[in-house]
Amino acid sequence: MAENRIKFASRLNEMSEELANLAKEVDKNRKQTKELATRYERSLQDSELTTEKCKARFDTSAEELERILLQKEGESFKDTGVQGRSPGGKRVIGKAVAKGGLLLKGKNPGNIQRQEDDIRARVSQASDAYRKAVTETQSLRQEYFNFQLPRILRALKECADEIDLGTQYHMTRYAFLFESIVLSDGSTLAPTPMDEGPGLKAVIESIDNRSDFKMYMQNYAYAHGGVQRGPRRNGPEHEGFLPPLPHHVDRSHLGAYTPGSSNSQLPDRGRPTFGVDLAEQMARDNAEVPPIMEKCCEAIEKYGLSSVGIYRISGTMSKINKLKERLDKDLDAVNLDADEWSSDINNVTSVMKLWLRELPEPLLTAHLHQGFLEAAKLDNDRLRHIRLHERVNDLPDANYATLKYFLGHLHKIVQHEAENSMSISNISIVFGPTLLGQGMMANVSNGQNGGMVDPTLQNKAIETILEHYTDIFIDESEGS
């Protein structure tokens, strides 16, 4: 448990570093996008300022040209009709007089004509420059608002989406890791029959303080020559003798106590199914599919296809243990159509999962466990489908027939996803570790301590097989 917690802490540290690196990268991209937007805005502002300067030069040249034309026509500034124009025109003429009125005095016609030509040239240059500046500013403004600004906003949104997706991914990964460590601790405390050795819970329950104390007292009496320093054990009680100890039942060989085991009065037909080798019980019952699976799946399809969270929600522990014991003693005598079981179909689904977990070997076998995980690692969907199909074909006949029947049952569950909210992904999360095994002993054959196997690979393997159920299990002749 300590090693698993250390690995769990190491995984959390890796996730923290990845999130920090992602945040730095996204912040860097955001700053670059912001700087690009600032440069475009500054360029647009500079272009507008240049346009204003060009306009001012054009206005000044136009004022000078107007003064020359007035002088050429011989009109006086006091009596000119231009002063009677709009307030804007009066201001322009007044400004022109203030700036260059003195230069117009004493000019002969030749000088006035040359001055007019020179000013006309400047007006033309100023007009061209102003027109060019306006065109460039309009072009730059259209490019910024129609192209650059939407692109910048999309880039900023992508930064926000990237950090959101990264956070969601790591939260999902954390949930998987946490479920794995809880499952690992549970397997350590109360291992299933497929694990080796008793768990801590069984070891603690096997301790009998009374028996140990009795043995200690016997050893003590033997070591001290059998001298009784306390009351004698044999004799009438009124004389101070203690009553004899009740008969001690050795519980060291028993497993963990399971509630509901009081139904031992039920007749035992001698056909146990829980914890029995799959091929052995199928040969014993002369069946192509384990009878308990067929019985439970039919009841689940009859009463639970529309049940929200089917297989994900567990039943009541006392009911589960009661149904397990009855099925293990006399499978044919159990009526799953009875209201006791059909009213809460989650008890039946929990027994179905319990039967799969208590198989001596996982349904997909320990031998092929690593092969399924290696196939699940492939990124190419088509290649992953082919490799997993090959691993399924490598299964023993009993395991293949059972897997085909059970995944066909799960395929029906998924078809009612709109009612029961159990998608292929949700079903895979529930049955990944169950069908492939807990993953703790995956590398024992290599002499290594396997530790925790990433459950995402187990889930991906089951999800891919279930997605391609028809391609893998159903022949064309059978499908037609």
Image (tube, rainbow, N blue to C red):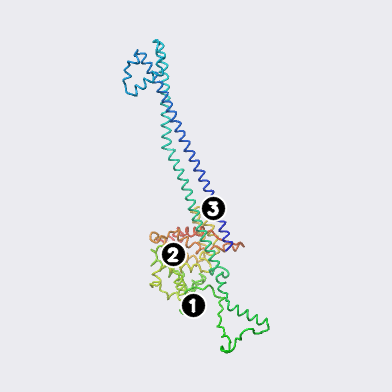
Q: Position of residue 61 (x, y in %)?
A: 41, 20
Vertical position of residue 191 compared to residue 164: above or below: below
Q: Position of residue 47 (x, y in %)?
A: 44, 30
User: 240 or 21, which lies in front?
Assistant: 240
Q: Amino acid under label 1?
A: Gly
Q: Amino acid under label 3?
A: Ser
Circle 2 — which element?
loop
User: 166 or 478, which lies in front?
Assistant: 166
Measured Cα–Cα span from mark 2 to mark 3: 31 Å
Which of the two discs, 3 and 1, labels the residue nearer the N terminus? Answer: 3
Which residue has dot 1 on it? 270
Which residue has dot 2 on it? 313
Q: Position of residue 143 (x, y in %)?
A: 43, 35
Circle 3 — which element?
helix
Q: Amino acid under label 2?
A: Ile
User: 273 or 383, which lies in front?
Assistant: 273
Which of the two discs, 2 and 1, labels the residue nearer the N terminus? Answer: 1
Measured Cα–Cα span from mark 2 to mark 1: 31 Å
Which residue has dot 3 on it? 16
Disc 1 crowd rating (10 Å Cα; few below 14, some 14-19, many 20+) is few
Q: Position of residue 108 (x, y in %)?
A: 40, 10
Circle 1 — which element?
loop
Vertical position of residue 462 compared to residue 248: above or below: above
Is 61 left or right of 6, judged from the image as shown?
Answer: left
